[in-house]
Image (cartoon, rainbow, N blue to C red):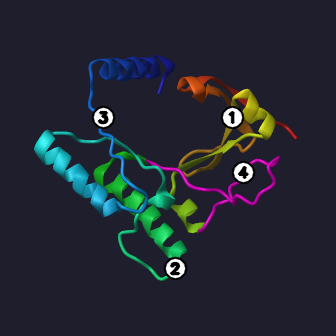
Amino acid sequence: MTIEAGLEKAEEIAQSVLRGKQLKLLCLPARSLSVEGLKGYMTNWAYYEGFEADVVVTDYLDKMKPDKEYGQYRHNIYDIALSHKALSLDRNILVASCSQSNTGRDEERDIKSGDVAEDIRKKAEIDIGWSLNQTAREKAQGVMRVKPMKTRHDFSNIADQCMVLYQLKIGRPILTSCNIRKYS
């Protein structure tokens, strides 16, 4: 995609948002909805309201109910990851979620691709994965570093990072951002 085409697409997206395109927000307690249940909502929205989602964001994969209960929690998590992938492929849509990392890691060390909590197999199912990193000092300053952990269809360099300035107190998850390259 050329820069001009990218700018045109960005303008098209901005205009569609300004024209009041639809957004559905479904807020439910943790472990009360499975991906199959979500598909039911989506099917009903399409049939009764003509709403076809092209982006689905779940918060977060580990808190969803599995479609089938397995004996071990890690198998349930993997089933949910597989169901997210299937939803994306079946409906040709973007499905995004987040997941816990190894919370016992050293706070001064960035999250690495192997720092996946509960079940490493869920990492095998994602197409793109980023880690959100910050030290205590960066958190106090409203700075977060975002870096690629995995990209299935493209080359990524783990030295590449994006620094994001944010201020949640005023409802601004992103104030500005820039690419940085960390050599160490």
Residue denoted by label 3? 23
Q: Quadrant of residue 48?
A: top left
Q: Is residue 181 visible?
A: no
Q: What is the x, y in percent for residue 94?
A: 39, 45
Q: Earlier in the sequence, mark 3 or mark 1?
A: 3
Q: Earlier in the sequence, mark 4 or mark 2?
A: 2
- Classed neighbour count for the residue bearing mark 4: other residues with Cα under 10 Å, few (<14), some (14–19), many (≥20): many
Q: Earlier in the sequence, mark 1 or mark 2?
A: 2
Question: Which sits in the foreground, 80 or 62?
Answer: 62
- Contact flag, marks 1 and 2 (Cβ < 8 Å): no
Residue denoted by label 4? 111
* Mark 4 and mark 3: Cα distance apart in space: 32 Å
| Amino acid on which disc 3 is placed | Leu
The residues colored magenta run 96-118
- Contact flag, marks 4 and 2 (Cβ < 8 Å): no
Q: What is the x, y in percent for residue 63?
A: 47, 59
Which residue extends farthest bottom? 71
Which mark is drawn over residue 10? Answer: none
Q: Earlier in the sequence, mark 3 or mark 2?
A: 3
Which mark is drawn over residue 72? Answer: 2
The residue drawn where x is 48% and y is 57% is 61
Q: What is the x, y in percent for residue 47?
A: 12, 47
| Amino acid on which disc 2 is placed | Gln
Above or below — where is 129 with respect to 33? above
